[in-house]
Image: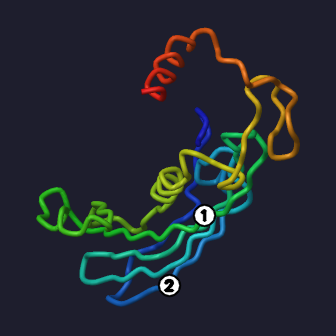
Amino acid sequence: MAKAGVKHHPAMVISISGLNDGEYPFSFDEPAAAIGLDDSFEGNVRVSGELRKVSTQFFLTGTIVARYARACDRCLTDVHREISIPVRLFYGHDLADDSRSGENDDVETRSIHAEQESIVLDEDVRQTILLNVPLKTLCSDGCLGICSGCGTDLNTGRCTCNHGGIDPRWAKLAEVFKKNEEE
């Protein structure tokens, strides 16, 4: 993200000035920081695909690939993952009144000005990546986590805590369950 007083130069720009109707491939390979992602994203963000122009409308299809690092939500070990996200964007003039906006939910629509010379993908790519990073990160589906008593990583060893006792705050609830089992 741009700091106050520092001018941000877009990293992923597709020139649309003077394009004839047709299909145009594009490809970007830019550092994650260049599009405003924080340092939990590793290396470059790759975006490739095709821009199709028909009259004054532009339809972009492609794939975004990014790497991120997070701590496992159960055991806190570092997890490095790559995500690949399909993207479909529609750019057209004055789309605010267009009845097409609700027709196809998997295509994002963007309005552009008639005199616009390029499409800057930076913010669209950044938001797409952020929305597709899983809310919960696990090192594996079978991650056992850490012991709540001693903090031992249960994936690498056994803890020596005594888990047999019932927390006194839950003792009354345990009695209810015990009564239900006896009946």
Q: Is residue 123 above or below residue 83?
A: above
- How packed is label 2: few (under 14 Cα within 10 Å), some, or many (20 or more)? few
| Colour theme | rainbow
85, above or below 53, in the image: above
Please rate how many residues cluster around mark 1, counting C-alpha atoms within 10 Å: few if below 14, some from 14 to 19, many from 20.
few
* Residue closest to the eye, 72 or 164: 164
State the residue position of label 1.
83
Q: Where is residue 133? Give x, y as percent.
A: 55, 52
Q: Is residue 53 left or right of residue 93?
A: right
Q: In what quadrant of the picture does the N terminus appear? A: top right
Q: Position of residue 103 (x, y in %)?
A: 18, 68
Q: Secondary structure at mark 2?
A: strand
Q: Amino acid at mark 1?
A: Ile
Reply above or below: 162 against 54: above
The amino acid sitting under disc 2 is Pro
User: Which of the numbered marks, if any, corresponds to residue 9?
Assistant: none
Residue at 65 percent across and 69 percent down: it is: 29
Residue 175 percent location from the top left of the image: 51, 16
Q: Residue at x 12, y 58 (%)?
A: 97
